[in-house]
Amino acid sequence: MMTTQPLTLDPARTAVLIMDFTQNIVDNYASDPPGTVQHAAEVLAAARKAGVPVIHVVPGGPGRPPAVIHPGVAPAADEVTIQKEKMGSFSTTGLDARLRQMGRDTLVLMGVATSGCVLSTARWGFDLNYKQVVVTDGCSDPNPDVHKLLTEQVHPNSFVGLWRLAQMATAREVSAALT
């Protein structure tokens, strides 16, 4: 779904999913922790200003200690944090039902790692017919080459790319589209 069209987002139909931005995951699995957090925080600020719901998705579940969200992207008082037990954000969370109840059909995705929670969530979201935008600089992977493979048309005939499932955009582009 690579496109040269400008990004447009309807704040009344959009939700931001920020996935696995825990202190431990960001510090150990992001290839550029400060840059990734900064770009994600930029999108969160724009979403909050536009009244777009932000949902924090973190690993968790029975018998696991509570996740500590990175302070650079800490939830606001009115934001939802949900725990997931699998790689993606949909299968163990009731997220689809929550989004449908909120009237949201467009998802802005950010997460660490691109090859983990972002790819898994984007595939599931695509199958559920969500319009999706991946914030390329608001995601990171331990291997920058894998991140590039997933977010750029490195192999245009391959089906591995996130660009087949979602529009790719920078934090600046997403922030502008939310204002």
Image (cartoon, grey):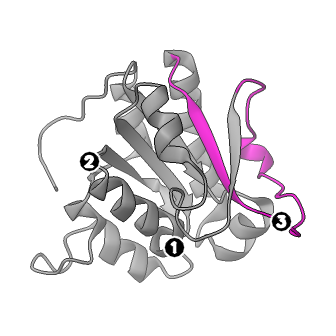
Mark 1 is on which residue type? Gly
Tell me the distance, in whole angstroms, between the alpha carbons under discs 1 and 3: 21 Å
Number of the front mark, 1 or 2: 2
Q: Which residue is mark 1?
A: 116
Query: Is 33 placed left or right of 176 in the picture?
Result: right
What is the span of residues highlighted in magenta in the rendered image? 51-78
Query: Is 50 placed left or right of 156 in the picture?
Result: right
Name the chief secondary structure element in magenta: loop
Looking at the rendered image, the quarter that the N terminus falls into is bottom left
Camera-nearest residue between 110 and 57: 57
Give how far across and how far down residue 20 sits, in percent: 65, 60
Q: Which residue is mark 3?
A: 62
**Is residue 63 on the magenta stretch?**
yes
Q: Badges 1 and 3: C-beta atoms under 8 Å apart?
A: no
Q: Residue 179 sits in which quadrant?
A: top left
The tag earlier along the polypeptide, 1 or 3, is 3
Camera-nearest residue between 60 and 2: 60
Q: Which mark is residue 22?
A: none
Mark 2 is on which residue type? Asn
Q: Residue 23 sits in which quadrant?
A: bottom right
Residue at x-position 41% and y-position 68%: 119
Circle 1 Cα neighbour tier, 10 Å, few/some/many (<14 / 14–19 / ≥20): some
Tell me the distance, in whole angstroms, between the alpha carbons under discs 2 and 3: 30 Å
Circle 3 Cα neighbour tier, 10 Å, few/some/many (<14 / 14–19 / ≥20): few
Circle 2 Cα neighbour tier, 10 Å, few/some/many (<14 / 14–19 / ≥20): few
Number of the front mark, 1 or 3: 3
Q: Which residue is mark 2?
A: 129
